[in-house]
Amino acid sequence: MKKIIICLLFSATIGILLGLYSFRLFNKDISVTSINNVYAIQVGAFDEISNANKLASKYGAIVVSESNKYRVYVAIVSDKLNEVEKYFDDLGIPYYVRSISVSNSFYEFLKEYEKNIDNNTEDTIKDILKKYMEEI
């Protein structure tokens, strides 16, 4: 009888220790980053980065690698899409508007910076692109 009680206590102790270890292992704080959709003004998508870099240097754009393609973005906007489209229409630059997801911190930065688009469109767009490259 004494051997059975010792065996049960030993088994219970091992079970409790493994349970606590498992709980600590899987009970970690998970931080969730809010994702926001914004618009990227794309002027090209290429299979080879050299072609993307040529176009990017022509327009002062950035190259983003995504889904085995090199995409060339000349602007990223959220609320000021119409103003930025008009800007590129006036320049005669053909483009395609894509929806992309960005982090909450970049989205807040973008919202603040977009306030300057009406006054200084070109510099504001360049600052936004530079910040986006830091984010990715």
Image: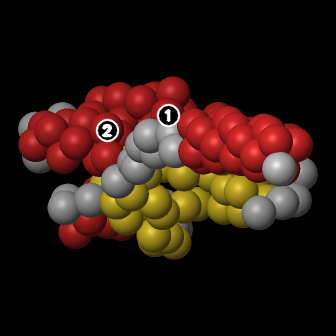
Indicate whether 94 appears above or below 128: below
| Residue type highlighted by circle 1 | Glu
Q: Position of residue 51 (x, y in %)?
A: 82, 48
The alpha-carbon separation of the residues under discs 2 and 1 comes to 9 Å
On the rendered structure, is 85 left or right of 15? left
Q: Position of residue 46 (x, y in %)?
A: 80, 59
Q: Is residue 62 visible?
A: no
Determine which of the numbered discs, if any, sits on residue 135 in the image.
1
Q: Position of residue 86 (x, y in %)?
A: 26, 65
Indicate whether 42 appears above or below 29: below
CA neighbours of label 2 inside 10 A, class few (<14), some (14 to 19), many (20+): few
Q: Residue at x 72, y 42 (%)?
A: 9
Q: Where the C terminus falls, by quadrant?
A: top right
> Which one is nearer the viewer's eye here, 3 or 126?
3
Earlier residue among tags 2 and 1: 2
Q: How is the image coloured?
A: secondary structure
Q: Position of residue 52 (x, y in %)?
A: 75, 48
Determine which of the numbered discs, if any, sits on residue 105 in the image.
2
Cβ atoms under marks 2 and 1 closer than 8 Å: yes
Indicate whether 9 appears above or below 131: below
Q: Is residue 134 visible?
A: yes
Say which element carries label 2.
Answer: helix
